[in-house]
Amino acid sequence: MRVLETEGLFKRYGDRTVLQRITLRVGKGERLALLGPSGCGKTTLLNILGGLDRPDSGSVKLEGEDLSRATPERVAELRRMRIGTIFQFFHLIPHLTALENVMLPLQLLNRKPMEARRRAEDLLLAVGLMDRIFAWPHQLSSGEMQRVAVARALSARPAVLLADEPTGNLDRKSGEAVLGLLQDLTDKEGTALVMVTHSEAATKVCHRVLRLEDGYLVDDALKAQVAGRK
Ligand SMILES: Nc1ncnc2c1ncn2[C@@H]1O[C@H](COP(=O)(O)OP(=O)(O)OP(=O)(O)O)[C@@H](O)[C@H]1O
Ligand SMILES: [Mg+2]
């Protein structure tokens, strides 16, 4: 079954159509990069894929379930259980330690404290921060904060990670470290990834590169095929 599937999505703000006829399929463990100029609708599309926003028409299915028809309670539940999110500015909870930030999604799902702790420690070890588990976010570098955010986004074993410019606020070296972790961990856990990015390096860890152009979604691989046929 596909992890995410959209059919003919449209989104308008006033008389401006931001997304037109977007049809997208994301398989288990597949990594997609989403590119496009500022203001073209990348975040809008990510918000619709994650159930934070609704399309004006068309459908979004997460593991076969139509988010555009689900109740707000069900969407919130699916977000906790099946969707992980990563942002450009990390969005860690400032009054929780690194460990507590990573445990939080599991606590929201009422997992046993010991089980949550073990899972969070495993992930913090995987992102190379085992010696920083009791640090507060303000004691961490930007790259370290984003590695905590990656661990947190994966802790509940979501089907898909939605990442909005996850390396946008990092220097090249920390950005590459985060991309390497996203690649390794999504491979290991079979998690799909939809990543908005402006970075060439980020497209390299993805299986497919998609571009938003004038509201339409264009697949680079299809473009290359068409060009090859000419
Ligand atoms: N709630 C809203 N109400 C009205 N217009 C909106 C709303 N949200 C976004 N827009 C507009 O829709 C367009 C797409 O916005 P979006 O944030 O999706 O762009 P983006 O591709 O993520 O840009 P960036 O690369 O700068 O983050 C923009 O012109 C924006 O001003
Ligand atoms: Mg954006």
Image (tube, rainbow, N blue to C red):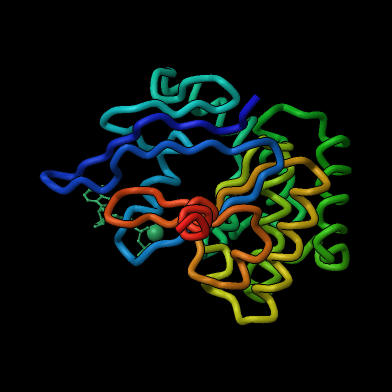
Between 186 and 78, the residue placed more toward the observer is: 186
- Expressed as whole percent of the image width and height from the top left, the position of residue 204 reads 65, 66
Ligand 2 is found in which quarter of the picture? bottom left
- Residue 62 in the figure: left or right of residue 227: right
Residue at (62% x, 48% y) in the render: 193
Question: Is residue 61 visible from the viewing direction of this image?
Answer: yes
- Expressed as whole percent of the image width and height from the top left, the position of residue 114 reads 88, 36
- Residue 61 in the figure: left or right of residue 187: left
Question: Is residue 164 visible from the viewing direction of this image?
Answer: no
Q: Is residue 37 above or below residue 161?
A: below
Residue at (71% x, 70% y) in the render: 144
Residue at (72% x, 27% y) in the render: 110
- Residue 46 in the figure: left or right of residue 176: left
- Expressed as whole percent of the image width and height from the top left, the position of residue 32 reads 58, 51
- Expressed as whole percent of the image width and height from the top left, the position of residue 28 reads 69, 36
Quadrant of the rendered image containing residue 106 = top right
Quarter of the rendering occupied by the N terminus: top right
Residue at (35% x, 66% y) in the render: 37
Between 221 and 186, the residue placed more toward the observer is: 221
Q: Is residue 70 above or below residue 110?
A: above
- Residue 6 in the figure: left or right of residue 167: left
